Amino acid sequence: MTIAAVAAAASAALLLPTTAHAHDDGGDEPSATRELQVADSGAGTEMSPVANLQYDDTGAAQAGSDIEFLKVGRREYALAGTLRKGLQIVDITDPTAPRIAAVYDCQISQGDIQVWKNGTRILASYTADGTFGTAGASSQCAKDLGLDANSSGTVIVDLTDPTAPKSVSFASVPRGSHNMTIHPSGKYLYNSNSDLITSTSPTITIYDVSVPESPRKVQDFPIPFVPASLGSESHDITFNEAGTRAYSAALSQTLVLDTTSPEQPKIVGEIVDPSINVSHGSDPITLTRADGTQRDVLVVTDERAGAAGSAECPGGGLHVYDVTGSNERDPKKLGTWFIPVVQPQAGTRCTSHVLRIYPDQEMLTIGWYGQGVRVLDISGLADVQGSPTTVAIGDGVGMREVGNYVFPDGDTWSFKTNRIAADGSFYGYGNDLTRGFDVYRFSGAGLSVPPLEPTDMRSRGGGKDRPRGPVPAEGAVALLATPFLAAAAVSLRRRFR
């Protein structure tokens, strides 16, 4: 069956009732009822829907959040976080026929995920945004670890056998784990606290997780307080490939940290940009200019109004900064990019959210809540010239949208992939608050890139089963690629303007 036929069959077969629900990254419960429309909306460019998977059969909102990937032997898995439906382990070995292989019963809110190796073991972290509550305390992970309804922090789980997840330990964070990021060494966890708005003494809680059974708190690293703002706590953190820099999106500020010594980070630079309403994520990429020199760029997402429903669309965009060399002490803004959608969407969420950057392929994928899933060619960031007032709609400031798909009932939190072909095509996976697990096919839009292949986490290579490029925000340490002919990357750079 062709991709088009699979998409048509999937679209025609799935029409279920569900429940819409509000989200402000704080785990709101379902509210109004609406119909889950899985039929092709026709609002797609270079993309088509392939399959939809529900996490339960209730017909209610599926509460999908973060998503990560894991390859073990010949099997490939998506690790789909949820708001109080547990960690859904989805077998995507055949992307056109995803199936739930196991569910880690840990009914906590948010469920941000990271994956890494510790010796021969495959570990993942799973966050509790705030306290466990009654549902979390009654689930298996809490029973395994002796936790109660007032517990808050991050659960560490063993996924060496993805079909039989096992609880390992718990890193307690009284202020909660809104998001967390594992250092590329696999030895440290940097926590972004849940106490986002009310805190006047913001910190990044650092844990040593080199002995997974006994996480050791290192310190609460203080970061600046921004008076008269929406908040100053770290919302999310991304490391560079070497682990020597971390980029913290902290609501009303974005910080550049020197993490050469992970236990003793230092603040290098700070961005306080009044045009960013909520600094949600900050992801770096290093590109090669036409003259052969390298350029470091930081992409900051604005989750405008905390993703509150409004008539404003396209909401918060992607803000781009040059952080090459001394610029990291005072990042230079190159401009702001928005999706090419400007019509009002009363009552729905429309703003940038969780993205993934693929460094070798110079591509970016992102979930935009009610405006679906997006694929960008970001090769132009290498040489683009811009300013703080430069604004692009769909194409500009070094980024060009090459694919999108929008369901009429979509509310997509995250959109990522684990494989990209040489022609730029891939199956992409969206985790949706309403719809659950969506699979899409991106045609490649005429791109030419180094292929991206997932790394087998069971292969020999010690504890550093690492991707090339930065550790993604709300992402996994060991998920992406073994490099493919890195020396050829420059010659394969896309220049389709």
Image: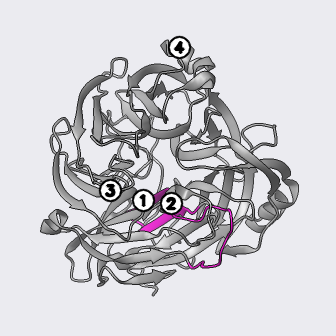
The amino acid type, in three-letter code, at marker 3 is Ala
Side of 477 relative to 429 (left or right): left
The amino acid type, in three-letter code, at marker 4 is Asp
Q: Nearer the viewer, mark 3 or mark 4?
A: 3
The amino acid type, in three-letter code, at marker 2 is Ala
Q: Which residue is mark 2?
A: 305
Chain part drawn in magenta: 340-368
Task: In the rendered view, tell whether residue 51 sits above or below residue 72.
Answer: below
Answer whether residue 478 is magenta in the image: no
Q: How far across and down, in percent of the image, does residue 221 sit?
A: 22, 38
- Depth check: 422 or 164 in front? 164
Disc on the earlier residue, 3 or 1: 3
- Whether tag 4 and tag 2 are in contact, CB under 8 A, the answer is no
Q: Nearer the viewer, mark 3 or mark 2?
A: 3
Q: Residues within 10 Å of mark 3 (few under 14, many from 20)?
A: few
Q: Residues within 10 Å of mark 1 (few under 14, many from 20)?
A: many
Q: Which residue is mark 3?
A: 228
- Depth check: 404 or 132 in front? 132
Q: Which residue is mark 1?
A: 278
Q: Which residue is mark 4?
A: 144
The residue at 52%/80% (across/down) is 394
Q: How far across and down, in percent of the image, does residue 305 sit?
A: 50, 60
Report the Cα–Cα distance between label 3 and label 1. Answer: 14 Å
Q: Residues within 10 Å of mark 2 (few under 14, many from 20)?
A: some
Disc on the earlier residue, 2 or 1: 1
Report the Cα–Cα distance between label 4 and label 2. Answer: 37 Å
Q: Is residue 20 visible?
A: yes
- Whether tag 2 and tag 1 are in contact, CB under 8 A, the answer is yes
Disc on the earlier residue, 3 or 2: 3
Q: How far across and down, in percent of the image, does residue 45 sit?
A: 65, 76
